[in-house]
């Protein structure tokens, strides 16, 4: 930040080297970008989403509970149109609740309101429990869910419940985009002073030109089945709060690997 005419402005910069035809560096070009208004807009948007999510949660929860009680009193033939309509309303109510929860959680992270409860965390236990939660669903879809851990792995100093949220999101994505008879690998290995934890599938993959935006909030690229484009953005916020980074490798038509690199 710098002061211009008594007003504080936020700047970002990029630098590009300038080379001589013979190969040596002559200098560099620096370009400054004033992002003051952009950051102010992002802050206002984040605060609005947080407040709106809080206000929406209570009435939607009440509607969901009331409809559940009503559904218990209604009895229709399983194959009837009425039963289909009830199931549709139930599914859409659940999606709405999930969207509100995702908005609320994402806003908490962006506003610095979410605090981590750090404790020693076993990577083996973290991954084994994640596989156990999704093994039944994988079997129903005729998908092999494989666990591959490079042993021995040191413990993380992390918030296990938040890392479970990341793995659940990645595994849910992988199961939705992997065809029957497919394979999903849940992997962990050590790379220097970081633990690399990844979820890899052999599904449809993501186009190269779209991979750069995959972690942006409210963005859906390539893999468009369900969701509001908040899951991966929330995962990235959680991993960054742990001092790590998140990335993706994908080849269209061959599969996708999402990974998180966490400090040991």
Image (cartoon, rainbow, N blue to C red):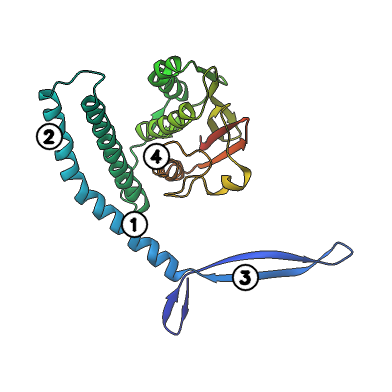
Position above or below: 44 against 32: above
Residue 249, compared with residue 138, is above or below; it is below
Quarter of the rendering containing residue 132: top left
For the residues bearing labels 3 and 1, Cβ distance under 8 angstroms: no
How far apart are labels 4 and 1 at the CA level?
A: 19 Å
- In percent of the image, x 63 and y 30: which residue is there? 254
Q: Which residue is mark 1?
A: 46
Q: Which residue appears at 14% of the width and 39% of the height?
A: 62
Taking depth in this image into account, of 120 and 48 the one nearest to the observer is 48
Q: Nearer the viewer, mark 1 or mark 2?
A: 2
Label 3: few (<14), some (14–19) or many (≥20) C-alpha neighbours in 10 Å:
few
Which residue bears the numbered disc 4?
227
Q: Which residue is mark 3?
A: 31
Q: Judge from the rendering whether residue 233 lies leftward or rightward of residue 112; answer left or right.
A: right
Q: Residue lying farthest left?
A: 73
> In what element is the residue under mark 1?
helix
Find out whether the residues at labels 2 and 4 contact each other: C-beta distance under 8 Å. Answer: no
Label 2, label 4: how far apart the Cα atoms are: 24 Å
| Sequence-first tag of 4 and 1 | 1
Residue 20 tag number:
none
The answer to whether residue 152 of the structure is visible from this angle is: no
Q: Residue at x 41, y 40 (%)?
A: 231
Using the image, determine if residue 155 lies above or below residue 224. Answer: above
Residue neighbourhood size for the residue with mark 1, other residues' Cα within 10 Å, grouped as few (<14), some (14–19), many (≥20): many
Q: Nearer the viewer, residue 203 or 197?
A: 203
> Tag 2, which secondary structure?
helix
Residue 138 location in percent, x, y? Answer: 45, 18
Q: Residue furthest right?
A: 22
Numbered circles on residues, count: 4
The residue nearer to you, when weighing 117 against 185, is 185
Give the labeled residue for mark 2. Answer: 66
């Amino acid at each position: 930040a710098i002061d211009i005419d008594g007003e504080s402005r936020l700047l970002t910069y990029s630098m590009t080297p300038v080379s001589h035809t013979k190969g040596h560096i002559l200098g560099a070009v620096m370009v400054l970008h004033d992002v003051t208004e952009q950051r102010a807009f992002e802050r206002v948007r984040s605060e609005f989403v947080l407040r709106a999510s809080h206000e929406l949660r209570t009435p939607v929860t009440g509607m969901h509970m009331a409809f559940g009680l009503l559904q218990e009193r209604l009895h229709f033939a399983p194959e009837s149109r009425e039963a289909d309509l009830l199931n549709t309303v139930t599914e859409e109510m659940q999606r709405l609740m999930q969207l509100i929860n995702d908005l609320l959680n994402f806003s908490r992270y962006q506003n610095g309101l979410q605090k981590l409860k750090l404790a020693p965390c076993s990577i083996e236990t973290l991954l084994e429990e994640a596989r156990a939660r999704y093994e039944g669903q994988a079997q129903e879809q005729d998908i092999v869910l494989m666990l591959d851990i490079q042993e021995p792995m040191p413990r993380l100093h992390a918030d296990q419940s938040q890392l479970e949220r990341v793995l659940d999101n990645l595994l849910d994505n992988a199961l939705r985009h992997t065809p029957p008879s497919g394979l999903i690998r849940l992997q962990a290995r050590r790379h220097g002073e970081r633990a690399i934890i990844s979820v890899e599938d052999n599904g449809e993959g993501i186009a190269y030109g779209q991979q750069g935006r995959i972690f942006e909030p409210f963005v859906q690229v390539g893999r468009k089945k369900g969701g509001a484009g908040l899951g991966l953005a929330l995962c990235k916020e959680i991993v960054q709060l742990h001092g790590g980074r998140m990335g993706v490798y994908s080849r269209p038509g061959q599969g996708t690997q999402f990974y998180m690199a966490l400090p040991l």
